[in-house]
Amino acid sequence: MLYFALVISAILLLLVNLIARKAEHPVAPILATAFLIGLASAMICIFLPPVVLQAALVCVVALIWGMSHYRPWFFHVFSCTATLVVFGVLGYFAFQETRHLQQAFPYVSMDDRLPTPKQQRSAEDLPATTVVRLGEMETLIEDKDRNGRSHYRNASLREIHEDAVRTFVDQPGFGVARMIRVSEESLKHEEPPIPQPGTPSASPWLPEELARKQPAESNTLDNLLSLHRGSVLDFVNFAGFGYIKDRQHVAGFQEHRVSQPPTPERPWTLQTLDLVGLWLHEKPIAYISKDLPRMKELRAAPTRELDDFETAGLLALQRGDDLFVRERGPERRLLGAIRAARQCLSCHEAERGDLLGAFSYRMTQDGR
């Protein structure tokens, strides 16, 4: 917008100074020219504040010149001075806003957030069905990138740091077009925490309960896999990845979080959803939180050892399964894998398909 405003401003300045030099009675034509160009700059689809302010100051200079009967040099000098003042003041504020955006979304290093993992990866190959589901997850992430706000947000964050001149030039103070502007408000979007819907399991699972096969109905397993995939996709929060130049330079990253509670098919009701951490501790742990998992809070949250169900489920996930399901009476437990998709590898020191963590679900039929 700055370049467009400069062109219109130069045309205005040239016209009024030619009138001041050539016209026999220049004040009225100068006022008319400045008024029309200023009005056009305010009324067309692009509002150009510098040109509007310049036109107003040119009118003031022309009136003072007309009443004082100074020579044309007076108008030439002060019309140019007025133009410089307008662009100087607006340029200062645009520069400050650009610096503010850089400071609000600075480069950070993922080395501080994601240190070298303490747990070793499993060397076993993943089953073909798990690889297919991982590819489907990556496709869903890409679709959200194309259709959601992530592309705009990431491009804007890149522009703030890698093309600061363009960010400065496109500041709203130089002109407001009918398009989305890079602003702190448009780049920040954080949902409030969501409380756990219910309570943890009241009793431990017995070995014979864990030995039972998971539900045999294919549609039940498909529905549970779909529910878990939706939870992982929500938790990953691809729109919050920000601009990733490299692992040491990431701008605008927003922590992984669950923004909406999973909704199982009736008659089941979600009671708790816990995050199981695998890499950053000496042995696997589950985070304890009164809210649904949000990494921003979980980094300082207490942890617990895995219960018998989660321990048995983790072995299945490490063998390549994506979901471990067991039922007893009105209670259902799920442990679902969170694997490294292709989009995760820029920050995580992992290989595609690595088990990064898991979600531990508890559901009941009677709301208990």
Image (cartoon, grey):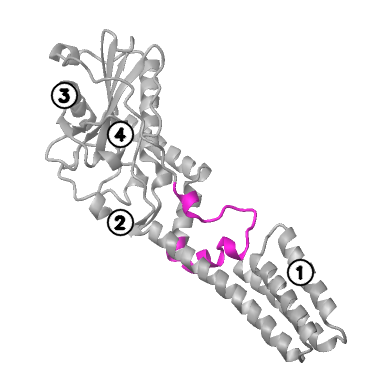
* Residue type marked 2: Arg
The image quadrant of residue 368 is: top left
Q: What element carries label 4?
A: loop
Query: Residue 326: which disc?
Result: none
In the picture of the structure, the residue carrying the numbered disc 2 is 247
Along the horizontal axis of the image, is 35 left or right of 256? right
Would you say the residues marked 3 and 1 are in contact, meaning their CB atoms lie under 8 Å apart? no
In the displayed image of the protein, which residue is found farthest to the front?
Answer: 67
**Which x, y percent locates residue 306?**
16, 28
- Give the magenta range: 160-188
Q: What residue type is labelled 1?
A: Ile
Left or right, 101 with respect to 12, comes to: left
Q: Give the structural element (helix, strand or loop) at label 3.
A: loop
The residue depicted at 72 percent of the width and 61 percent of the height is 42
Check disc 1 and report the residue beneath it: 37
Q: Name the residue under label 4.
A: 293
Task: Please give the name of the residue rendered at 56% of the width and 72% of the height, measured from the top-left corner.
Answer: 89
Please state which amino acid type lies under the numbered disc 3.
Answer: Asp
Q: Earlier in the sequence, mark 1 or mark 4?
A: 1
Marks 2 and 1, how far apart in space? 50 Å
Question: What number is the disc on residue 307?
Answer: 3
Tell me where residue 225 appears, x and y as whole percent.
36, 25
